[in-house]
Amino acid sequence: MTFAIITHVPHILEQNQCFAYAPYVREMNVWAKYANKLLIVAPKSNSLKTSIDISYEKLNIEFIAIKSFDVLSVKAIVKAIISIPKISWQIFSAMRKADHIHLRCPGNIGLLGSMVQILFPNKPKTAKYAGNWDPKSKQPLTYRLQKWILSSTFLTRNMQVLVYGEWEGSSKNIKRFFTATYQEADKLPIMQRDFKSQIGFVFVGALVSGKQPLYAIRLVEMLYKKGYNVALELYGEGIERKSLEDYISKNNLDNIVWLKGNQTQETVKKAYESSHFVILPSESEGWPKSIAEGMFWGCVPVATKVSCVPFMLDYGDRGVLIAVDLEKDVRQLETLLKDEILFKNMSQKASDWSRYYTLDVFEKEIKKLLAR
């Protein structure tokens, strides 16, 4: 089977191998097990490979480099108008060669892919919508447009659209799905935590305003000022790093807050294992990978009520749903910090739930999708 992937994820070509963002590639390696050849239609990056980039395991790959584009300024719109016809033709050519078409959404490339796939009603197709599918959420027009196209059983045929969460009024194209990081073999005993030593919080994600890493710092800072022995490690990089460093220095938090940068999966796993809480006060999410990973290792999740997060946290029974209201959220956390039995029960529930969604289960579900 020739499997075509249409994605906005930048790829690095080095020594006849394709490298890209590790969580994405790990997932695509699972899909690729059931293909003889991969056609990857994606932007080519000239950046150097980093610790968070890994290669595809499939050797038979045809990479089709396309230009990335945005519509955030007049100049960018003009460039997009010039680039879109060629990109659309490249996507069309790949889809014509493919036995199965796979779109990665949302994004500008995903939008073009969702339009071009209309021309192939008889080919089996899947789309992974990694963003927030909640129809009530405020989203850019391009996101809403591709959601409408993918949902339409008239325009989009022979397609299964994988989304996070279960939403009322969804068409038959839409299938609730999940993402996994760990295998059954990774289900090692969870380290027992108590409150006798320092209470650890961990944030894993891009240091950008949408993920609200500053709010995570302020939340831990307030708990610290209230006399709790807490600390926070942040893993990830982004444009907010300098302002976070300034805030940490200005408020003398160097002894309880640390910016660890991008790290390997193993390093991040050890952070989850030793932390009490995993925190992600994000403004928008699809499937918050760091929350699911932290829960796998017994961290109690602390996250905002976006996308499928309330479902993941069982509406507060296996985690803390925060409102990004500092005083209110601190009070919620204090309730747990004053009741170690409640914390341990919540930790166990979080782990039990997350450990169902393993790569083994994920692969079985993908095999079913490709067999249809």
Image (cartoon, helix red, strand yellow):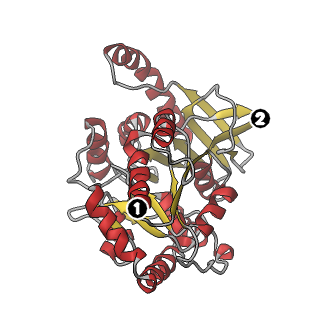
Q: Residues within 10 Å of mark 1 (few under 14, many from 20)?
A: some
Of badges 2 and 1, nearer the viewer stands 1
- Dividing the picture into quadrants, the one containing residue 50 is top right
Q: Seen in the image, is 317 located left or right of residue 24? A: left
188 is higher (above) or lower (below) than 232: below
Q: Residues within 10 Å of mark 2 (few under 14, many from 20)?
A: few
Give the number of callouts: 2
Q: Seen in the image, is 346 located left or right of residue 196? A: left
Q: Which residue is mark 2?
A: 16
**Rendered location of residue 149, percent (x, y):** 29, 45
**Rendered location of residue 280, percent (x, y):** 42, 56
**Rendered location of residue 306, percent (x, y):** 31, 57
Q: Which residue appears at 38% of the width and 57% of the height?
A: 222
- In this view, the residue in front, 156 or 30, is 30
Disc 1, SS: helix
19 is higher (above) or lower (below) than 33: above
Separation of marks 2 and 1 at Cα, in angstroms: 50 Å
Q: Is residue 323 visible?
A: no
- In this view, the residue in front, 75 or 345, is 345
Q: Which residue appears at 60% of the width and 29% of the height?
A: 44
Looking at this view, name the residue that lies furthest to the right: 15
For residue 29, which numbered disc appears in the image? none
Q: Which residue is mark 1?
A: 223
**Rendered location of residue 218, percent (x, y):** 39, 51
Mark 1: amino acid: Leu
60 is higher (above) or lower (below) than 348: above
149 is higher (above) or lower (below) than 229: above
Mark 2: amino acid: Asn
Q: Is residue 188 visible?
A: yes
Disc 2, SS: loop
- In this view, the residue in front, 357 or 203, is 203
| Circle nearer the N terminus (2, 1) | 2
